[in-house]
Image (cartoon, grey):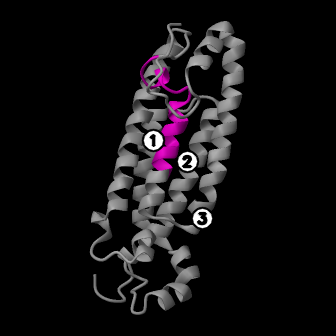
Amino acid sequence: MNHMESAYGLWSLVIINSAIFIMFAFSFFKPNTTRDWRTFGAFSAFVIALFVEMYGFPLTIYLLSGWLQTRNPGLDLLSHNSGHLWSTLLGEKGDPHFGILHIASYIFLGFGFYLLSTAWNVLYHAQRQHALATTGPYARIRHPQYVAFVMILLGFLLQWPTLLTLIMFPILLVMYGRLAVTEETEMRKQFGAVYEQYAQCTPRFIPNFKRKTGNL
């Protein structure tokens, strides 16, 4: 890309990329309840905010332009590479797409979508049988779908941080945490002692690989 050639104002890419990731997540998550739609809606808002700054209008770059130019004289703020702020702030040379943080972001994104897919498959069959989901990722953590969304959000933040998404991230963490607690309350009412036994031997968010889930 030539110096001072803007990499932004590409609103068609904003729409296309937002649609791809949102529909991809929708195909795995398949929201049904109000709680599901709230979870998915918050995720979608994060994705749209991300791609608006990635290809539409670089609000974060604009707000930090003076400081960035002082810190990095000669930096082309309108280039796409400059938008990879972690690489810019760390002073990394070369294409940021091959940097360690970018590679790590792909790992988070890939595993996040994989976890979302496998968790939904287990939950779908459990719901059809009116049973408690305790196999697959549910054998290790009680809320794999929320963990999957967080991993995907982290992947995006490692790849393209913005002020808005950095503000949204902790808010979404609190939101998913509260939704998880609400969901557990409902499961206790529905499954009683069975869920209590499951909850006692299965961590909420962080898996304990040294401890196996008991038979339910």
Q: Residue 45, relative to residue 162: is it above or below?
A: above
Comparing 72 with 56, the one in front is: 72
Q: Amino acid at mark 2?
A: Phe
Ranked by sequence position, the earlier of labels 3 and 2 is: 2
Q: Position of residue 15 (x, y in %)?
A: 45, 59
- Residue with the mark numbered 2: 43
- Was residue 50 drawn as part of the magenta stretch in this picture? no
As measured in the structure, the alpha-carbon distance from the residue carrying label 3 to the one carrying label 2 is 13 Å
Ranked by sequence position, the earlier of labels 1 and 3 is: 1
Comparing 214 with 169, the one in front is: 214
Q: Position of residue 178 (x, y in %)?
A: 70, 37
As measured in the structure, the alpha-carbon distance from the residue carrying label 1 to the one carrying label 3 is 21 Å
Stretch of the chain drawn in magenta = 135-153
- Residue with the mark numbered 3: 164
- The answer to whether marks 1 and 2 mark residues whose Cβ atoms lie closer than 8 Å is yes
Q: Residue at x 70, y 20 (%)?
A: 186
Q: Residue at x 51, y 78 (%)?
A: 61
